[in-house]
Amino acid sequence: MSVSSGKAGGISSIIYRVPTLEDGVGIYSLVQNSKPLDLNSLYSYLLLTAHHGDTCIVAELEGGVVGYVSAYVHPKKHDTLFVWQVAVSERVRKQGVGLSMLTGILKRPGFQSVRWLETTVSPSNTGSARLFHSLARKLNTSCHTSVYFSRDLFEGQSHEEEVLFRIGPFSMY
């Protein structure tokens, strides 16, 4: 497990690390309090940690989870990291934690072949849109957007469309 401390916008005691099963409840609670993110079951966060822990990251401050990114290498595009959710506690928002988590994952050993990052963002989630545009600028690359899941696919639910953000190509090495 990789543990690193880093300064994130003035917060020098945040620890960025691979999540453990013991983080499950903290991750669930963080996402629950991070509107407009869709809350998944606690079981799904435990599975993500157990099966994809090496592609996910937790930001910890004073023993609590203040940030979380769930991600995985796309099964059909081995050069693409797909980011499912980014959650940052209000306590540390607008201090670079989201960007630090994303770049932290991309700098991990074993990610040398990743050249693209994809994610989906609903149109009303302007904070996430800003984060991914900032990531593209930091990586000195482009960010292309297109509708990925149209609203009609969420039949019977009041869910916005999901816009695909495709960032790249880039190299962290």
Image (tube, rainbow, N blue to C red):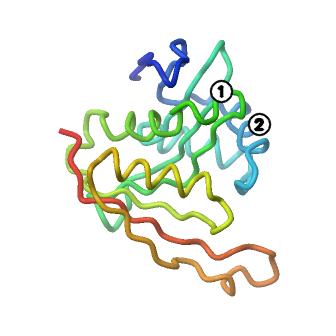
Residue at the image point whose x is 35% and y is 60% from the top: 167
Pick the residue in front: 68 or 160: 160
Question: Is residue 11 toward the left or the right of residue 153 in the image?
Answer: left
Give the farthest residue toward the bottom.
Answer: 152
Mark 1, Cα crowd under 10 Å, few <14 / some 14-19 / many 20+, is: many
Considering only vertical position in the picture, is 140 above or below 154?
above
Q: Secondary structure at mark 2?
A: helix
> Would you identify the image quadrant in which residue 80 lies?
bottom left
Quarter where residue 90 is shown: top right
Q: Is residue 159 above or below residue 112?
A: below
Question: Which three-letter amino acid code belongs to the residue tagged 2?
Answer: Ser
Crowding at dot 2, Cα within 10 Å, few <14 / some 14-19 / many 20+, comes out as: some
Residue drawn at x 62%, y 18% as measured from the top left:
61
Report how far apart the C-alphas of labels 2 and 1 lie in the structure. Answer: 9 Å
> Reading the chain from its start, which is encountered first: label 2 or label 1?
2
Looking at the image, is 43 positioned above or below residue 142? Answer: above
Q: Nearer the viewer, residue 60 or 143?
A: 143
Q: Locate the N terminus by quadrant.
A: top left
Query: At 70% across and 74% down in the image, what residue appears?
Result: 160
Residue 37 horizontal/vertical position (percent): 70, 54
Q: Which amino acid lies under the numbered mark 1 shown in the image of this protein?
A: Val
Residue 173: x and y in percent read 17, 38
Q: State the residue position of label 1.
A: 65
Where residue 108 appears, as percent x and y from the top left, is: 31, 34
Kind of element beneath mark 1: strand
Say whether marks 2 and 1 touch (CB < 8 Å).
yes
Where residue 107 sits in the image (x, y, percent)? 30, 35
**Horizontal placement of 145 versus 128: left or right?**
left
Residue at mark 2:
29
